[in-house]
Amino acid sequence: MNYYELILGDEDIHYSTNLIEYINSDKEQLIRARGFSNQEMLNHYVQNNPIDILLITPSMYKDTFKNADIKAIIILAEGKMKKELEKIPIINKYQNIDNILKKIIDLYAEVNEEKLFTSNRTTKLIGIYSPIGRCGKTSISIRLCGLLSKKTKVLCINMEPFNSLSQDKNSDIQYTFSDLLYYARQKHPNIILKLESIIEKINGMDYIYPVRYYQDLNEIQKEELVGLFQILKEETKYDYIIINFSSHLYDYTLELLKQCHTNIFIKIPDPFGKMQMNNWEDTLKSIREEEILEQSLTIMNHIQVYDGHKNFLDESIIQLPYDSQLKTHLLIEEEIPLDNNLLKIIERL
C-alpha cells in the first residue's frame, strides 16, 4: 500500500498540530502528514523535496510554489479568498476533519494516476441477494460485515435503491454509491482513490451508502459495472467486499452475481416467500444461469416465526432466528454472540 505525503502550511500551531496528529494516528489512512508554521522553513522544504499534497493557508502561499515539484496544491481557507487564489482548489478550514480528508483525497485523485494498492491476492466479492422483500437482507449484510471486520478488512456496498438503515440525524452523508457509479461511468483513471473518498468508516468497517437517487441504478450500463467489479476484485485493500444487491432484477444483476466469489441467497419460511424463491430458481435454470445457484449459500431467515418449520429444512441451509431486537442504526455498535449462526456463513466463504 502506498502512502501520500501531505505538507501542511499553517501559522496556527494548535490547529495544525491537532490535524496532523489525527491524520497520523490512523494506520489505515492513505496520507502521512507533517507541518510547518514558519514560512522560511516551509519555503526551503518545498524547494528541495517532491511533495504529493501541499495544504496551505492563503497567508503562507507563495506564487513560486506553482513551479515546485508538487502534485496537488490545496488552499485551506477561512473566509474570502484573494482573486489570484480562486483557481486553486479550496477546502474550508473549519469543518469536520473526516470531511477535510475526504475532500483532500478526492482532489488528489484528479491529478494522481499511480496505482494505489499492489497485491498478489484477489479480494473476495460476496453477493447478498433475495427476490423477497423484507427478508432481512440488509440487516444480515451489515451484521456479516461487522463479524468479518473483527479480523479482516471489509467493505460493505449497499446497492439498494433506497437507504433502509437509520443514521445519526445530525450526520451529513456527502458521498454515496451514486458517486462511485459516476466515476465508473466516466472511466476515471484512479477510481480506487476516489473510492477512498466515498467510504464511511462505521464501527470498524467501511461502508458505502446506497444511491442518492434511485434512477442512478437504471442509468449505469452493464459493461461499466462489470468493469467496476473487476477493479474492486483486483486493486483494493480489502479481504472481502460485501455487496447488498437490490431485490429488483436489473439488466446487470445476474452478470454481477456471476462476478462474485460466493452468493448468499435469503429465504423466509412463509408460502409467498417460498413461491418467489422457487420462481427465481426456476427462472435461472430456464435461462441456463444455474452456475449462479452452484456458487451460493442459502439462509433461512426469521426461522422462529413459524414453529416447527426448521425441522424440515435441508441441513445445508443456514438457519437464522427472528430477532425483534435487531438494531438497524449504523452508529450503534452491536455485540454479536460468538455462537451466532452467521459464523457458519463465514466458515464457508
Image (cartoon, rainbow, N blue to C red):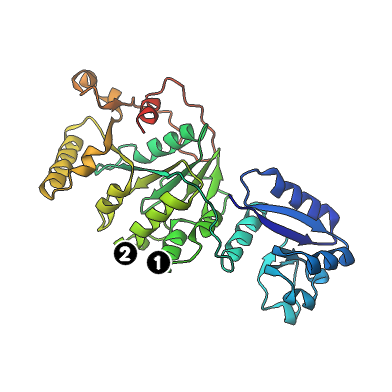
Q: Is residue 94 visible?
A: no
Q: Where does the C terminus fall, quadrant-wise? A: top left
Q: Secondary structure at mark 2?
A: loop
Q: Residues within 10 Å of mark 1 (few under 14, many from 20)?
A: some
Asked whether residue 130 appears in the rendered view, the answer is yes
**Residue 289 percent location from the top left of the image:** 18, 47
Q: Which mark is residue 185?
A: 1
**Disc 2 marks which residue?**
221
Give the left or right position of residue 305, taking residue 108 as reference.
left
Which callout, 1 or 2, points at the residue further toward the start of the chain?
1
Marks 1/2 in contact by CB < 8 Å: the verdict is: yes
**Residue closest to the eye, 215 or 127:** 127
Q: Residue at x 78, y 78 (%)?
A: 63
Question: Residue 1 at x, y = what percent?
Answer: 58, 49
Please, is residue 251 above or below residue 301 in the view? below
Q: Specify the amino acid type for callout 1.
A: Arg
Horizontal side of 36 relative to 92 (left or right) equals: right
Q: Is residue 253 left or right of residue 170?
A: left
294 up-or-down from 182: above or below = above
The residue closer to the viewer here, 262 or 302, is: 262
Q: Determine the CA span between mark 1 and mark 2.
A: 8 Å
